Amino acid sequence: MKKDIYIFPAILSFDEDGISVEFPDLPGCLTCGDSTEDAISRAKEVLGLHLYGMEEDNDLIPEPTNIKILHLESDQIPVLIDVVMPIHRKAIENQTVKKTLTIPQWLNKQALKHDVNFSQILQDALKDYLGLNKN
């Protein structure tokens, strides 16, 4: 079930060349930063992306491990990272994607003469075709 807010523990590992971040409950959810603030900011972003992907794939999102029971090395600290998913979902779903299409050369010439915004025309036409225009 999708939640509006997730909070997961992250482990920040400090090294000479920066700070790496891992989420023990979410294998493959990793990032890094140059400072603690940068690492936490990137951790929020990667956590949102990772959880969005899990939601889209209908993967089971695990319960977060209690931060008190994490096993840490001397160069590590635990941090709770929260993400507000409606914000992340909206940002991800509104990202643009590049599409390649073909049209006859004569039509392209006419469109260029009229300074046509191909992307906007295609978006408008798709919304009309799919009945998504709101009046």
Image (tube, grey):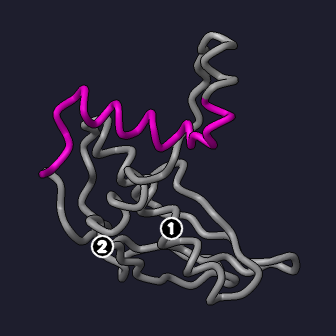
Separation of residues labelled 1 and 2 (CA atoms): 10 Å
Foreground: 57 or 128? 128
Choose the circle earlier in sequence order: 1 or 2.
1
Find the magenta span and give its range: 111-135
Q: Residue at x 58, y 19 (%)?
A: 101
Image spot of residue 83 (x, y percent):
35, 73
Label pair 1/2, CB-CB below 8 angstroms: no
Q: Quadrant of residue 6?
A: bottom left
- Residue bearing the label numbered 1: 45
Left or right: 2 in relation to 14: left
Identified by mark 2, the residue type is Val
Establish if 33 lies above or below 122.
Answer: below
Identified by mark 1, the residue type is Glu
Image spot of residue 9 (x, y percent):
41, 74
Establish if 35 lies above or below 112.
Answer: below
Q: Residue at x 63, y 63 (%)?
A: 31
Left or right: 9 in relation to 87: right
Per the picture, the main secondary structure of the magenta-coloured stretch is: helix
Foreground: 52 or 27? 52
Outermost residue toward the right in this view: 16
- Residue bearing the label numbered 2: 84
Q: Circle 2 — which element?
A: strand
Q: Which mark is residue 119?
A: none
- State yes or no: residue 130 in magenta: yes
Label 2: few (<14), some (14–19) or many (≥20) C-alpha neighbours in 10 Å? some
Image spot of residue 24 (x, y percent):
46, 61
Image spot of residue 62 (x, y percent):
27, 53
Label 1: few (<14), some (14–19) or many (≥20) C-alpha neighbours in 10 Å? some
